[in-house]
Amino acid sequence: MKKWQWALVSLVGVGMIVSQYLDFIASPPEAQMGNVVRIMYFHVASAVVAFTAFGVTALFGIIFLIRKKWLWDQIARGSAEIGLVYTTFVLISGSIWGDAVWNTWWTWDPTLTTTLILWFLYLAYPLLRASITDRERAAKVASVFGFIAVIDVPLIHQSVTWWRGIHPNVITAQGFNMPPSMVVALLFSFVVFLGLYAVLLWINTQLVRDRDTLNDLREQARSVLAKYDERIGS
Amino acid sequence: MRALELEGVVKALGHREVLHGVDLQLDAGEIVWLAGRNGSGKSTLLKVAADLTPVTRGVVRWFGAAPTAHLRTRIGVLLDASFLYGEMTAEENLIYYARLYGLEGKQKRVLEWLERFRLHRDRGVPIKTFSKGMRQRLAIARACLHEPQLLLLDEPYDGLDAAGSQILTEWLRTLQGAGTGVLLVSHAVAPFQDLTYRTLRLEQGRLYGGGEP
Amino acid sequence: MRFLRTLFAMVGKDLRIEWRTRQLFISSLSFALLLVFLMGLVLETGAALASFSEAGLLWLLIMMAGLFSLNRQDDKERYEGAIYGAYLAPVDRSVVFYARVISHLLFVLVMEVILVPLYSAVLGGAAQVSWAGFVLVLLLGTIGFVAVGAMLTSLSLTSSLREILMPLMLFPLAVPLLLGTVEVTSATLTGGNGAVIWWAVIAAYDVLFLVLPGLLYDFIAEV
């Protein structure tokens, strides 16, 4: 690893610790929800990462389609995996929050519903890739799918919002005013989580690339062996 | 005129590079026999030349220009799959392709082709009942229907009986006279050895000129 | 001109083959009718459904039966590689996508003609239906559904998990369409015409999935 890479990783590491301090000690419990509010720092920041990750997947998928360089596809792939993990975090932390605050594990909150749909879509993404043997075709197909999925997200979110708006909403999120220390903690967790995402993306892209290289080498070894067999045979 | 030109064509399939920089020129009225072992990349080369799959690197030119949708009227392609519909009759299949190419006088032309390949008696039968040889004849008719000036054929003699082979060879001779460039992949040379042709060998994704195998 | 001519040739070919065998149509329709019967069984017929549930079940039914045919209808293209023959046609390759949309659309619409009346007879409780709105939403909803479906069949053409991946990709993507059509259908079943925003959602969805795949098709149209 290069120097600046160490610096980035250390920075994110320190940031995570500071963020824990802000989330658990420096910020106050909320008037009605008490300490449950601290889930929010994790939940919302995870959601930011998840949506960013899928945006990155769609963007680099399109760049790959136009430029045909494997690196772009590897970034898209790496990002999609991280996105799926963070979407899962969002859903789980959202459920815990919902149980504590609204006394229900699941609510048809528009953003939560959109996240669940997104989770399904990005569950299909790696399956689609893995079930197509031709690597180039798999990459192209996945890029198109990732792009379409992300384009569809605003429409999904908007329609779910209107849908909830028209139907009686049994559970409403009570609004609350945040004191400055909570705002700071929340914003800081955004920054740190995005930093963590950047580090993870960088590492995961390398992993994905190594997997590709390994497959290339296997393929090469196989063809060298085939040539060798041919010589022995003749 | 050059009917087909490949320049430094590299094609990777998945993790495997199948073609490593292929250069090929095919003139109008020329027949090139593309020889090579199984798995040497012949079929991939044909697909690339037909613009059915994009090159990883390199250039493909038809009649001196980059492949476009419009230029596809001038090329004919036969791959290992026949591209035919089993539920439709021989006649319907050809008429469908005639429509795709926007041909005039479809009915007459289709009948001519069916007669040329001795399929006119079975023209009303769904082709899923056809034997391999009959299907192959129809597939060749399908590839040649619009009288292309560049013909890419993958194992056209496969499954043909003596009569069928003879018809095809005669047709290739006619085409050659009319100035059509033909790139022909075949494991055997016997069926068309009377024609004037040039040999290219594909070995491990590289192209070598001349010489009998 | 050439585009349209090719489009018609492809649709004509699909209809001819479908008409000749009719197996797919009959089995899809039987499946849908069976579902209607089962729904009637578990929902206790006689007790009329609320209009929203009635509309929701109807659309799920249409989409499930449609999915069945989307999954199978392209088998004929894969057999003997016929779809690649279509890629040789001297027009933009997106014609294959649009031909597929039209063929699927006709297929599903004909199925609806039989399915919807039977469904209303078994499960319908609507007294005053505004017919114009109902028919229009049925048409627009089906267009959106087959458009996204045709796109996804092209994507999953060479996937070995195709049959299970199709619903996994299709239904999440179709959520806006499903909500829109169910809202509007539900309104038309009680004599209304549905809110403008829902018509807008359906229209936006239709346009999006008719235009976008056409633009992206070249990337995935290859052997």
Image (cartoon, rainbow, N blue to C red):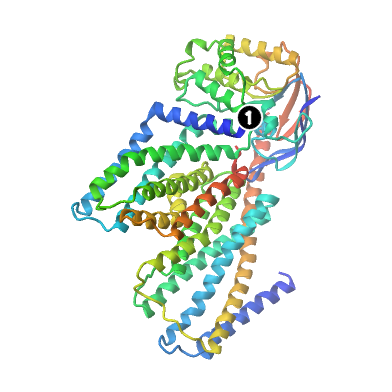
Viewer-side residue, B209 vs C150: C150
Q: Is residue A194 above or below residue C169?
A: below
Quarter-wise, where is residue A78 in the image? bottom right
Residue B159 showing in the rendered view: no
> What residue is disc 1 on?
B38
Question: Where is residue C218 shown, x and y percent of the image?
Answer: 62, 43
In the figure, is residue A137 to the left or right of A115?
right
In the figure, is residue C69 to the left or right of C122?
right
Viewer-side residue, B146 vs B49: B146
Residue A14 showing in the rendered view: yes
Q: Residues within 10 Å of mark 1 (few under 14, many from 20)?
A: few
Viewer-side residue, B105 vs B65: B105
Give the residue drawn at x 54%, y 40%. C97
Question: Where is residue C77 shown, x and y percent of the image?
Answer: 50, 33
In the figure, is residue B133 to the left or right of C56?
right
Query: Which quadrant would the N terminus of chain B be assigned to in this image?
Result: top right
The residue tagged with tag 1: helix, strand or loop? loop
